Image: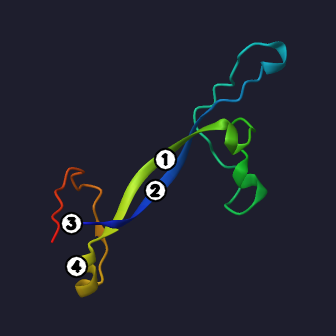
């Protein structure tokens, strides 16, 4: 059975900006999670309210989330199927 339409969520974790790079050392500020200063679509959405760093300095974590629809079932019912609990070792048959 083939499924299509995988989605993903992106989360930003700890800050990895090296504040002591100019001195040839390594020191981070200890910020554990990105918190946007402003709403999505504004310049504040890319700045962390906790440490003031740009979002690119924070560890990016991609969380796969499957919003799959079964091609055989979708045409009949028009519903999406959440396959996040599906086994990744599902068997496929060729006709």
Measured Cα–Cα span from mark 3 to mark 1: 25 Å
Q: Earlier in the sequence, mark 3 or mark 4?
A: 3
Residue 46 x, y percent position in the rendering: 71, 50
Tell me the number on the disc at residue 8: 2
Q: Do the residues labelled 1 and 4 touch (CB within 8 Å)?
A: no
Q: Are marks 2 and 1 in contact (CB under 8 Å)?
A: yes
Quadrant of the image occupied by residue 95: bottom left
Q: Image point 66% across, 49% down: which residue?
A: 36
Measured Cα–Cα span from mark 2 to mark 1: 7 Å
Q: Which of marks 3 and 1 is nearer the N terminus?
A: 3
Q: Earlier in the sequence, mark 1 or mark 4?
A: 1
Evaluate whether residue 35 shows in this view: yes
Identify the secondary structure beneath mark 4.
helix
- Label 2 or label 4, whichever lies nearer to me, is 4
Tell me the number on the disc at residue 1: 3
Residue 84 x, y percent position in the rendering: 30, 56
Tell me the number on the disc at residue 73: 4
Tell me the number on the disc at residue 62: 1
Measured Cα–Cα span from mark 1 to mark 4: 29 Å
Q: Between residue 82 and residue 93, name the one nearer to us.
A: 93
Q: Which of marks 2 and 4 is nearer the N terminus?
A: 2
Q: Image point 24% across, 55% down: which residue?
A: 85
Give the quarter of the figure containing the N terminus. bottom left
- Label 3 or label 4, whichever lies nearer to me, is 3
Measured Cα–Cα span from mark 3 to mark 2: 21 Å
């Amino acid at each position: 059975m083939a499924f299509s339409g995988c989605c993903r969520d992106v989360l930003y974790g700890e800050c990895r900006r090296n504040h002591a790079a100019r001195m040839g050392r390594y020191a981070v500020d200890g910020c554990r999670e990105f918190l946007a200063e402003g709403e999505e679509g504004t310049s504040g959405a890319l700045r962390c309210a906790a440490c003031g760093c740009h979002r690119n300095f924070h560890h990016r974590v991609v969380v796969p989330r499957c919003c799959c629809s079964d091609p055989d079932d979708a045409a009949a019912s028009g519903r999406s199927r959440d396959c996040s609990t599906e086994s990744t070792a599902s068997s496929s048959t060729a006709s």
